[in-house]
Amino acid sequence: MPDKAAKMPDNEAGQALLAAGRWLFAQGCEFKKGVVSLEALPPADRLEIAFAGRSNVGKSSLINAITKRKGLARTSNTPGRTQELNFFLLAANNAGAEAIEGAGWLVDLPGYGYARESKSKIAAWNRLLNAYLQGRPNLRRVFVLVDSRHGLKANDMTMLADLDKAAVSYQIVLTKIDKLKRGALETVMAQTQDALRKRAAAHPQVLATSSEKGEGVDALRAAIASLVDLPALGYKAELNDTQAG
Ligand code: GDP
């Protein structure tokens, strides 16, 4: 089954990270702010992790799946409406979350590549996105979602080039793998990894997910947890002393 590719390495450190990811997302996650201009961005005083992807890639569904909150990110948004950067506070129910060293922001970037969008809107979106990517020192990683049925498209490649240029670390997350035929996941995985090989800011691990079936959702939580200052939130890893092994 495709599930194999979605899993973290099957060792104790990988298991510890999966547990940490589950813990982190049991701490709640709350929508705080929708932003349409750079002036309105919250202070860059904490870790930030963003999600990008073509419209309809399944970004809202995946954010809802990792946070276990069905209505948190709005699914099937009408393309072409006001494009916002949506800020969600990670571990919002944790007493340390509002503190500077607490969890951080999950940022839902507007979907790109909607065919019927006007040129001026696309240009405005690109300006906002590039200014955001270049001016956000606390942005630790952008998860770029790619529909597993289609693989990387031209506008995804533009996104990756923008990220390389801004020197922002990014990781590809394949979506909707439940829609793939048997064997197709291995092919798209290999093609995607190949396309990333020479890209400066790309994380080599490609995640494979299905919001519908839950595959890879824990692995994505774990990838996020690996970036968060968990001890600052009071997390004590159960398998802490096994990580060296
Ligand atoms: P967004 O525009 O990127 O936020 O995409 P949405 O989350 O709104 O999803 C777009 C469409 O794809 C919706 O009809 C979802 O039901 C569907 N979808 C999203 N994730 C999955 C998935 O993992 N599997 C399947 N089969 N459909 C999905």
Image: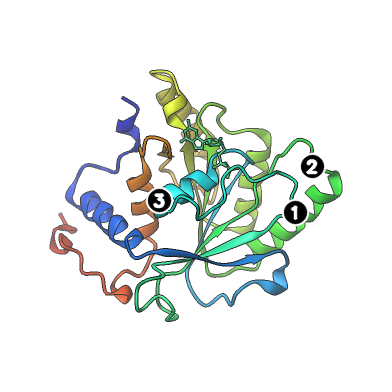
Please, what is the three-letter code of the amino acid marked with disc 3? Ile
Is 209 on the left or on the right of 137, as rendered?
Answer: left
> Could you tell which of marks 1 and 2 lies nearer the N-terminus?
2
User: Is 151 located above or below residue 142 in the figure?
Assistant: above
Distance Cα–Cα, label 3 vs label 1: 26 Å
Q: Residues within 10 Å of mark 3 (few under 14, many from 20)?
A: many
Residue at 47 percent of width and 45 percent of height? 62
| Coloration of the structure image | rainbow
Distance Cα–Cα, label 1 vs label 2: 10 Å
Is 171 on the left or on the right of 225, as rendered?
Answer: right
Residue 147, position as x, y percentages in the image: 54, 33
Please, what is the three-letter code of the amino acid marked with disc 2? Glu
Residue at 15 percent of width and 59 percent of height? 239
Residue 53, position as x, y percentages in the image: 59, 44
> Could you tell which of marks 3 and 2 lies nearer the N-terminus?
3
Residue 47, position as x, y percentages in the image: 47, 69
Please, what is the three-letter code of the amino acid marked with disc 1? Trp
Q: Secondary structure at mark 2?
A: loop
The residue that disc 3 covers is: 66
Q: Secondary structure at mark 1?
A: helix
Select label 1 or label 2 by which is in front.
Answer: 2
**Quadrant of the image containing the C terminus:** bottom left
Q: Residues within 10 Å of mark 2 (few under 14, many from 20)?
A: few
Q: How many marks?
A: 3
Is 211 on the left or on the right of 42, as rendered?
Answer: left
The residue that disc 2 covers is: 117
User: Is 84 located above or below residue 216 in the figure?
Assistant: below
> Could you tell which of marks 3 and 1 lies nearer the N-terminus?
3
Residue 219, position as x, y percentages in the image: 34, 46
User: Is 180 located above or below residue 134 in the figure?
Assistant: above
Disc 1 to disc 2: CB gap under 8 Å: yes
Residue 125 disc label: 1
